[in-house]
Amino acid sequence: MENGRFQFPFPYQPYTIQEEFMRSLYSALEHGKVGIFESPTGTGKSLSLICGALSWLTDFENKRKEEAAALLQEGEMSLSSSDPEASVQSSSTEPDWITSFVQKKAERDLVSKLKEDEMKRKKREERLERIRNNVQLKYALKRKSCEQDEAFKSLQLSEEGQTDAAANQDDEDLIIAEYESDDESKSKSRFCGDEDEEDDELVEEHVTKIYYCSRTHSQLAQFVHEVQKSPFSKDISLVTLGSRQNLCVNEEVRRLGSHQRINDRCMEMQKNKHEKPHHDEGAKRKRGPAKSVCPHNKVPALQQMRDKLLGSVHDIEQLLKLGRESHSCPYYATRLAVPQAQLVVLPYQMVLHEATRRAAGIQLKDQVVIIDEAHNLSDTLSCIHSSELSGAQLCRAHSQLSQYAERFRSRLKAKNVMYIKQIIFVIDGLVRVLGGKVGPNPQSQVTQAATEMLTINNFLFRAQIDNINLFKLHRYFEKSMISRKLGGFVEKYVGSGVTPHTPVGSQKENRRTEGLNRYLQSLHGNQSTAPAPPNDQQGSFEAEKALAASPMMQVEGFFMALTNSNADGRVVIHRQGNLSESSVKFLLLNPAVHFAQVLKECRAVIIAGGTMQPVSDFKQELLFSAGVQEERITEFSCGHVIPPENLLPIVLCSGPSGQELDFTYQNRDSPRMMDETGRIISNICNVVPGGIVCFFPSYEYSRRIVAHWESAGILTRLANKKKIFQEPKKANQVEQVLGEFSRCIQRCTQQGGGGLTGALLFSVVGGKMSEGINFSDDLGRCVVMVGMPYPNIKSPELQEKMAYLDKHLTHSGGKSPGQALIENLCMKAVNQSIGRAIRHRGDYSSIVLCDRRYSRPATLAKLPAWIRSRTSTHQSFGPAFAALRKFFVEKKQKLD
């Protein structure tokens, strides 16, 4: 097939829609398109992505190999030819022999480059073949068991030394290095290997690869398992990337808990590893414990683990197991494997954020990026690049940085002092904008409650910091690592509650740091200085550690956000009655500005999801705004694999008593509307077996309507038919509620429920159970959507976003871009919720949309095509209820 394939390797006979998906994907990658791909959950989307994309990658590499071989052969033949007429006659005034020499040199250089590339490719392939055949590599012998023992003995001695001599440890690692220039310095290698290691394999060029991104680690693990089941599992080099928090195997570091503290400790260990001892004659050895290094970060072990990763497919759990067994670090080993990996699996925040991309060693030039579960891509981009600081955080950062500058003022270079003073000045300005002062306790400072929305420039003028070059400050944050230094300072002197060791005569420093300790405790309402009981020592220690966390990383993020273009963002000032709870928030209005670099650099970008409708906002807000032309965009949407008779979507315009269903903000709280909704649910419970999931537009409305049903006796009638469950307030309780919900349905369907026919779950659109939860089979035989979950139109942030879109995007379909945003947000949330029920080919379910507004053609058009084509609208309840009863009677008869 020209520029495509007819057949794809697949673990079983693919569905027709899967074959269509893979052909469209192959074509999009071949022609460098930006693709929007929609394939409902349960249709094998992950396997289609894997087999389609890896088929293209295999063909692409084979084609490149053939082209390189042909060019090499042609070049060698040209060089071996001595025919003078073979030379192209030059039209310049240069003599023929010079023209011939230049041409021959260019040909020789090309042949030499082709030979070098071919040699590298063969070397890579041979190495991978040896790895996959478990042949020992040249450096595998470097790591002996005795070296492992020595490393762990060193770690143990280091920990003992820290325990015995913590009070004597010097502050050298807390001092910021001399900052010599404002210019960008050449970036150093992000891999911390032994400096004396002369192994050219540490620095490798990137092969053509596919970056697969998804939202959560569980989704990534599921994708890796699909790769392991695919026909490519034995031939593909796959690497899974994650954070230190997910991949660290050093138990001492893992115990620190928080993401920031794990990062800081790891980076400190890398610094200790590379510090060169001073051999100056007469130099005294500094007192204090030996600085610990990580025993899992040894070059031979990392190289060995890297090759194991490239040789076979591992998920994160297998990575951790392999790291513990081989005493090597999965975090650094995976990054070392990125250049030679053909498929890199990672959370999409790591691709969408430029600084994180650089840190992970991700190069997008001419590569392929697949973003799965991308229905909230625009919101994700806005969230990643937005930032918020509370008054309490600002005051804490100001106090910490002031104390740091005071303590080390005699040891900091002039430029460091200058930049620290600028940071303090900016923080002071931000606190003034909130109506407070940096000195007194922020909890006791009263502010006038109000919300303001400002452009970036107006905010800088208001805070009186418009004379500060925030770009230089951002560069200083990056190069000086002041956030990490300050975090270490606070943890050392405040987190443990120990009075800092200071030289005699420096009582001022002592008093300032003690004051910081008391001040931080007061922020958290911890005024007690009495020692904790022995059984509470661990909890007290953890509380103090949490207290010690420096907010400087958040301050750095906010400073960076303020460097966005004035038109692309706004700053929201929230005054909440006191300074501590007030906040400044940067709101990104144009996510396309950060997505544009990904679209520009990559060969192709695929945006995929189970429900991508409506796609108009993807194209307008992310693609067109980023400069993508219409001809580069391709769309693919397929139906479901279930038979048409297995789905019954109904739009219900009125209830059993004839009450019109209009859940607008003005009508939805009326007792008549709530009573009618209760009657609808009660009737549905009479005919639907197993589980029913009922979605409400908000937590507040869910609380109000359930309270009304309880007082009116409706809840009791519902409970007589199905056991009632409610979405929990805490995320860690979701699994428990789902487990009980599932067990109840199982008991009712298998053993009889003593009058109960199943269970009824009250959930919230956009809540903990509207995404990522499968209500397959008997868990979700009916999904009821009560009303339309429009976002809060009175939100200042949403109003500003609508105004921005109205100003910068074109109007279409008789509606402004702002109005279209509201409808698209609503229908995206609806589509995610109602897609929870149908999960596989043999599944069946009904969907009841309770609101007359769903019958509008423009609204119906925003439903997924496979649902829209089967949706029937009923103006009265009787015919709708009859269709629902008939649907389940037929399913029961078929099963019997």
Image: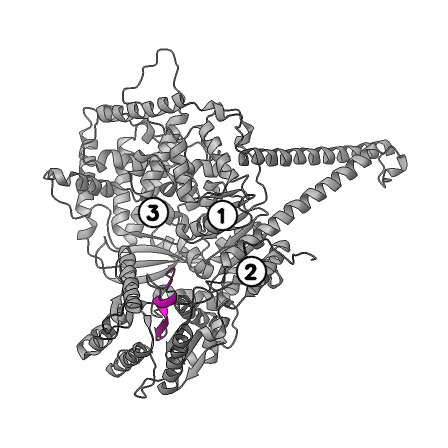
What amino acid is found at the position of numbered circle 2 in the picture?
Pro
Residue situated in front as seen by the camera: 478 or 476: 478
Residue 246, x across and y down, in percent:
37, 43
Residue type pointed to by label 3: Gln
Of helix, strand and loop, which one carries label 2?
loop
| Pointer 1 local density, CA inside 10 Å: few below 14, some 14–19, many at least 20 | some
Q: Nearer the viewer, mark 2 or mark 3?
A: 2
Determine the secondary structure under disc 3: helix
Is residue 702 visible in this depiction of the protein?
A: yes
Q: Which dot marks residue 228?
A: 1
Mark 1 vs mark 3, foreground winner is 1
Sequence-first disc among 1 and 3? 1
Q: How many numbered marks does the figure carry? A: 3
Q: Which residue is mark 3?
A: 554
Q: Which residues are magenta?
A: 770-790
Q: Which residue is mark 2?
A: 14
N-terminal-most mark, 1 or 2: 2
Q: Residue at x 24, y 59 (%)?
A: 576
| Contact flag, marks 1 and 3 (Cβ < 8 Å) | no
